[in-house]
Amino acid sequence: METQLSATIIAYNEEHCIERCIRSVSWADELVVVDSFSADRTADICRRFGARVIKQKWLGYVAQKNFALEQAKHSWVLSLDADEAASQELQQEIQVLRQKEMGEVSGYYIPRKLHYLGRWIKHGGWYPDYKLRLFNKEEGRWEGKDIHETVACRGETGKLTGDIDHYSFLDISDHLRTIDKFTTISAGELQAKGKRAGIGDLTLRPAAAFLRMYLLQAGFLDGVPGLILCGLSAYHVLVKYAKLWELANEPKITTDKL
């Protein structure tokens, strides 16, 4: 008997990419989209392709994805972000698995491939970026910190070969906006752990990140997009620790009158 499967997606103002994501999982027995009250056409597009759209205010990445899991009717779930899509190879691989009752594991790690500035990135430590996204929700749950969320599975896991295609950034400006957002979150998490930023964090860490990705992990093989990605990844490290330094050194604002 074929295993029933739900596809879950969290979304907010994703009209530029949600159709690609939805189409890539249209074969699932159920499509569940948890929408954080998008102001664009995201919800309408999802409904047009047969998805069940549930409105839920933003709870954070971990809580929002666990909320989506709770809405799924079937035990087996494929979890995608709105800027991702299941490749044709992955779709076919999952369809074969469903005929075998998903094997004797509780979940599967899937390689994720980044599309950046018109090119599929295969180096620089970006591929294969294995993520546990296909799993039995009775055995797995989202855990961790926001932007570092992962699925923890109690049982055995396997690996698939088909990719999740990741269209993370629309362009360089979008990448820079993402860096600004995520570094603020990361700096706050580091401060909460009692970490402080020193000169080495602001100089050596960004340089080491670029050298590791561009040279040791062969990011140069991805051409100019690879160079830009490695450079902005090093900048990400610099901004994260600069914001951590700022949190500890920002001037105290008082309301005392002169």
Image (spheres, grey):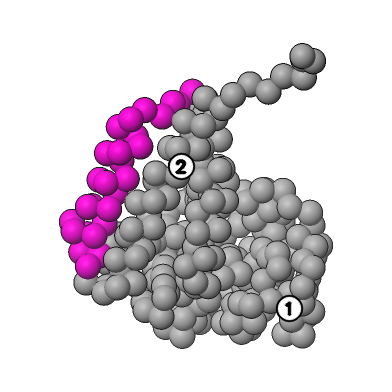
Residue at image coords 30%, 32%: 200
Crowd rating for badge 2 (residues with CA inside 10 Å; few <14, some 14–19, many 20+) = many
Against 27, residue 151 (above or below) is above
Q: Position of residue 120 (x, y in %)?
A: 36, 77
Q: Position of residue 18 (x, y in %)?
A: 64, 76
- Asked whether residue 215 is in view, the answer is yes
| Residue 64 forms part of the magenta stretch | no
Of labels 1 and 2, the one closer to you: 2
Crowd rating for badge 1 (residues with CA inside 10 Å; few <14, some 14–19, many 20+) = many
Determine whether label 1 and label 2 are within 8 Å by CB.
Answer: no
Q: Position of residue 187 (x, y in %)?
A: 51, 37
Mark sitting on residue 7 = none
Q: Which corner quadrant holds the N terminus?
A: bottom right
Secondary structure of the residue carrying tag 2 is helix
Mark sitting on residue 46 = 1
Q: Which residue is mark 2?
A: 240
Q: Position of residue 76 (x, y in %)?
A: 59, 66
Figure label count: 2
The part of the image, by quadrant, that contains residue 14 is: bottom right
Q: Which residues are magenta?
A: 194-220
Disc 1/disc 2 C-alpha distance (Å): 35 Å
Secondary structure of the residue carrying tag 1 is helix
- Asked whether residue 96 is in view, the answer is no
Q: Amino acid at mark 1?
A: Cys
In the image, 128 versus 234, the foreground residue is: 234
Q: Which corner quadrant holds the C terminus?
A: top right
Q: Amino acid at mark 2?
A: Lys
Residue at image coords 41%, 80%: 118
In the image, 223 versus 21, the foreground residue is: 223
Q: Is residue 101 left or right of residue 219?
A: right
